[in-house]
Amino acid sequence: MQEQRVTYLLQQRLSGNETPAEQKELYTLLEDDSNMELLMEALTDLMWQAPADSAPVDTDARDTLLQSITSADITLPFVESLQPVKMIHRVWWAAAVVTGLLVAAGLYFFLRPVTPVKPSSVLAERYKNDIAPGGNKAMLTLADGSSIALDEAKNDTLGHQGNSSIIKLQNGQVAYRSSGADAPVSWNTLSTPRGGQYQLTLPDGTGVWLNAASSLHFPTSFAGNNRTVELTGEGYFEVAPLSGKPFQVKVNNTTVTVLGTHFNIMAYTNEKALAVSLLEGAVNVSHQGTVRKLLPGQQALIGSNNNITVTGADMMEAVAWKNGFFIFDRADIITVMRQLERWYDIEVVYEGAPPQMSFGGGMQRSLPLSGVLKILEKNGVLFKIEGRKITVLR
């Protein structure tokens, strides 16, 4: 099947103008895994060709199609970036297609071909000690100091704190269910290790996703006029609206205040800046007497100078971890490897100075470490796995 024909079939499907015969032809292609690379190449061509004023597509058709294509085991080849290509039309590519050769929805994508390098040693030898990806692991510390390893606990009621029951649900997440009765307020802490993540529902119905090496300190019920929690590391929040009772997150001498919204806070102490990214609603970011309001699509950055800088940001990249992906936009190798350190619980060392290169694109966090490193090696950098130590060879 020629690529031009595949491109035509994809265009017809995405626009909702396909005939029954064309639909059958495309679905026949999708059923054959050997056609996946050709399909992804055609999608990439469409991405380049999509004009800024492209008409909206049939979104149901698009999402079904992209889900079929990205369910195949194809990963994105990372390449060193020179110049970002044009921004892809957000309506066309609102679905995040990250598993294959396409990253969309406002993420700059770099497609410059790279000449493969010859490994300095046998690939199998360098990757003989592979490391599995992280998973749902967390420790819940109760008010009395006792702890529950949530990844080992059964799906059931785990205990009671104040007027709330702690329940581990069938999907593995933990929820606090308030009885509404008067009771002393207790404080609990949910902590994820390196290589762990976890999802929690607070007593008010707010959903919290914790990334690796993070913690959330929270009350078992929200008394008074505020709902306040304390975060370290990184967390994504979907705050339940509660009129007259704002939700506050305290992190690194910064307070984020909301009424009901979706936002992400990245506050790892080894990163260059604390970042608050707003997806929906509005938040106030307060730091050392300065308050800035964010609107959807904006990000507040607080660096070593303690100033709050508000910029537009790619929300897909900001919450990629929560959706099961790594996404990088012109990230240097040190930034990339810090994310891998947290998710795979590894130590990264450099043989000489870190390579001066940048990366753009994405891949699944469910890949084993060797799968991620092999993709990064397409840039000319080499790695070696020794136990949980990863050496960047060049």
Image (cartoon, helix red, strand yellow):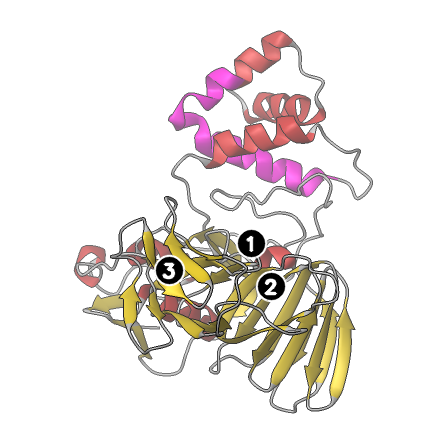
Spatial separation of the CA atoms under disc 3 and disc 1: 15 Å
Q: Quadrant of residue 23?
A: top right
| Sequence-wise first label, 3 or 1 | 1
Q: Nearer the viewer, residue 111 or 344?
A: 344
Identify the residue position indicated by label 2 in the image.
82
Residue ID at (73%, 41%)? 91
Q: Is residue 257 left or right of residue 2?
A: right
Amino acid beneath label 1: Arg
For the residue labelled by badge 3, is the local secondary structure a helix, a strand or a loop? Answer: helix
Residue ID at (73%, 90%)? 289
Read off the magenta span.
27-50
Of tags 3 and 1, which is closer to the observer? Answer: 3
Magenta stretch: includes residue 348: no
| Sequence-wise first label, 3 or 2 | 2
Spatial separation of the CA atoms under disc 3 and disc 2: 17 Å
Amino acid beneath label 2: Leu
Q: Nearer the viewer, residue 241 or 361?
A: 241
Identify the residue position indicated by label 1 in the image.
112
Residue 178 image offset from top left, x and y in percent = 50, 58
For the residue labelled by badge 1, is the local secondary structure a helix, a strand or a loop? Answer: loop
Classify mark 1: residues with Cα within 10 Å, few (<14), some (14-19) or many (20+). Answer: some
For the residue labelled by badge 2, is the local secondary structure a helix, a strand or a loop? Answer: loop
Q: Nearer the viewer, residue 332 or 305?
A: 305
Q: Are marks 1 and 2 in contact (CB under 8 Å)?
A: yes
* Disc sitting over residue 377 in the figure: 3
